[in-house]
Amino acid sequence: MDFTLYILQCTDGSLYIGHTDDLDCRMEQHGHGLGCRYTAARRPLKLIHAEAFETRYEALTMERKLKGWSRAKKLAYIAGDWSAIGALAKGKHKHQRVREGASTPLVARATLGANGKGPITRQTNQESDA
């Protein structure tokens, strides 16, 4: 039995991600406003992506992963644009992105003084390796 990960575009432009073992039945439920309060208030819905998985666990794992992604990253996934997904995976904050020409990302490390109360000092991977 296949399980399907699906992504719907709601009338307000938002994206809804779910998984099911019967896509036709689930789409009918969504269309009638049943089974999900979020989509019931945002009809009509448009199916913009469907992907088959062998197990429910695999479909659910991908669903949860996608729900944590930004809208831009989800749209890149739907388009199959892996270079954009890679670029969007760098992090939205400066300290999470790879510095141009650097081999490792800038990761802030916080340390306290020996007594646990001193000032917090921050250093990057490059500073700590020196």
Image (cartoon, rainbow, N blue to C red):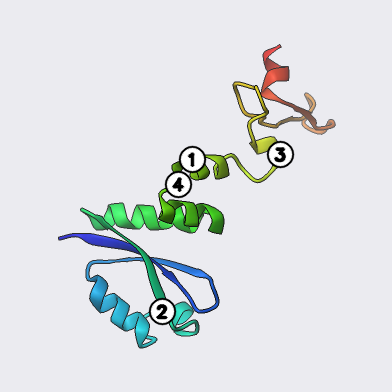
Which of the marked residues, 4 or 3, is nearer the chain's N terminus?
4
Q: Quadrant of residue 22?
A: bottom left
Identify which amino acid the numbered label 4 is placed on: Asp
SS assignment at label 2: loop
Q: Which residue bears the numbered disc 1? A: 83
Kindly report the distance in space between the C-alpha atoms of the residues bearing marks 1 and 2: 33 Å
Identify which amino acid the numbered label 3 is placed on: Lys
Residue furthest left as drawn: 1
Q: Are marks 4 and 1 in contact (CB under 8 Å)?
A: yes
SS assignment at label 4: loop
Mark 1 vs mark 2: give the one in front.
Answer: 1
Q: How many residues crowd mark 2 within 10 Å: few (<14), some (14–19), many (20+)?
A: few
Q: Position of residue 80 (x, y in %)?
A: 40, 49
Identify which amino acid the numbered label 1 is placed on: Ser
Task: Work out whether residue 56 or residue 97 is closer to the camera in this orientation and state it.
Answer: 97
Q: Which residue bears the numbered disc 2? A: 36
